[in-house]
Image (spheres, helix red, strand yellow):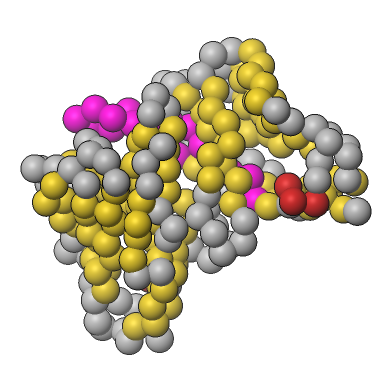
Amino acid sequence: SAVISQKPSRDICQRGTSLTIQCQVDSQVTMMFWYRQQPGQSLTLIATANQGSEATYESGFVIDKFPISRPNLTFSTLTVSNMSPEDSSIYLCSVVTGSSGYTFGSGTRLTVV
Amino acid sequence: QKEVEQNSGPLSVPEGAIASLNCTYSDRGSQSFFWYRQYSGKSPELIMFIYSNGDKEDGRFTAQLNKASQYVSLLIRDSQPSDSATYLCAASGVVTGGGNKLTFGTGTQLKVEL
């Protein structure tokens, strides 16, 4: 299965600032998925990132707040913009590997103060 | 609203017992189903996936799928304290442009007691 390097692993940020999270995959993948896991909650899909096209956002998530880049088939970034304490979450990237498996990055634990 | 539902638990079982985790889903278009284990502070790791009705076994784990009832379960035999974690059920659907996205349940916390 693919190996995903995600960074930073954690950060504490001031409200109103932005943080960019990076995911690097050790193989080429068509689609990358960005999830959010709020404290005590399950994973919610933010958007799906295809190389060479605009990301597709789920209901409740908008590009201005969560811009995504996908410059090539092994790399993607998610930016959390104009942060507020409600954005404090774990952010995870994921890719489909093999016939049916989904692999997750190690996650970015974001705290907004 | 496409949902995957799980009992949040905690489900407590004694060491060596069988743990039974259940999940229902609302979208009949869901194609594949996944069980992930998540330890506190860690990212989810895939245990099993299933896409055909019936049982699928892998070591101490058995996944069961009943599409007519829209029901998925995970059985863990000979439960060990190291199995204590949150178990997430996920269903795979189709996104625009191809590919699949996962919809997750809220997870069931399992505690295996000595």
Query: Horizontally, is B44 left or right of B64 in the view?
Result: left
Residue at the extreme left? A52
Residue sitting at x 21%, y 52%: A75
Query: Where is residue B89 drawn, in percent x and y?
Result: 57, 38
Query: Where is residue A42 drawn, in percent x and y?
Result: 52, 52
Q: Is residue B28 above or below residue A17?
A: above
In front of the other: B51 or A113: B51
Q: Magenta part of the protein: which range?
A: B86-103
In front of the other: A72 or A47: A72
Query: Horizontally, is B23 left or right of A89 in the view?
Result: right
One can see residue B90 in this view: yes
In front of the other: A21 or B28: A21
Residue B92 among those drawn in magenta: yes
Residue sitting at x 14%, y 43%: A51
Query: Where is residue B24 drawn, in percent x and y?
Result: 60, 31
Asked which quadrant contains residue B65, the reply is top right
Q: Is residue B95 above or below residue B40?
A: above
Query: Horizontally, is A9 left or right of B25 in the view?
Result: left
Asked which quadrant contains residue A10, the reply is bottom left
Residue sitting at x 35%, y 70%: A8
Q: Is residue A43 above or below residue B62?
A: below
Query: Horizontally, is A105 left or right of B15 in the view?
Result: left
In front of the other: B53 or A51: A51
Query: Where is residue A39 drawn, in percent x and y?
Result: 53, 66
Residue at the extreme front? A26
